[in-house]
Image (cartoon, grey):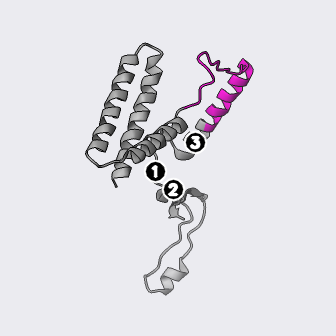
Amino acid sequence: MKKAILTALLTTWVACAGSLNAQDEKGGSADIEAVRQTTNKLIELLIQSGILTKEKAQAVLDDALRSARETQPAKKGKDAVVRVPYVPKVVRDQIKEEIKQEVAAAAREEKWGRPVAYPEWLERFKFYGDFRLRQQMNRFDASNGDYVNIQETNSGNGLLLLNTKHNVSLWRFRLRFGVD
């Protein structure tokens, strides 16, 4: 348990020293030296109090330095050159157009920016319907004779005549709705 705490403490110290090392090139060497002195005094106090032996302290310090070296990027020298390959404008424009098309396809699929986007379950319903309007005109000549409506007369409604002289206009309509 104590070794884990010490390892964490020393790893933190080495990481700080690494970040201060980057500052050292800009003139922050006093900060680095202060961190080193503080860490050395802490290790001496742990050895004097009997929590650590000199061998264990050295092993923990070596382990912390090794892990810090692994996490820091390797430098090739003080004046390391970073090369960035040149990408022609045609290729950059092509990449930009491909990204635009991908984003537009995602926007259509996920319905970005649609103020009246319905929930998915509602879009499964299909509504349909129709409307039919019909007009029928029955025209009769005014010189037609009178005829008896035999069906109405036989059903006991008295003597009724058929309409054979007056024009009749019939309007019919049908309105249907449905859901699938």
Between 100 and 140, the residue placed more toward the observer is 100
Asked if residue 116 shows in the view, the reply is no
Q: Earlier in the sequence, mark 3 or mark 1?
A: 3
Q: Is residue 158 above or below residue 112?
A: below
Q: How far is disc 1 from disc 2 in space, using C-alphas?
A: 7 Å
SS class, disc 2: helix
What residue sits right under mark 2 in the picture? 123
**Decide: marks 3, 1 in contact (CB < 8 A)?**
no
Q: Quadrant of residue 101?
A: top right
State yes or no: discs 1 and 2 in contact (Cβ < 8 Å). yes
Q: Which residues are magenta?
A: 73-102
Residue type for callout 2: Glu
Asked if residue 50 shows in the view, the reply is yes
Q: Mark 3–mark 2 contact, CB under 8 Å? A: no
Amino acid on which the number 1 mark rests in the picture: Tyr
Mark closer to the chain start, 1 or 2: 1
Horizontal and vertical percent position of residue 55? 42, 46
Q: Nearer the viewer, residue 102 or 21?
A: 21
Q: Residue at x 46, y 46 (%)?
A: 117
Q: Which residue is mark 3?
A: 106
The amino acid pointed to by label 3 is: Ala
The Cα–Cα distance between marks 3 and 1, rounded to whole angstroms, is 17 Å
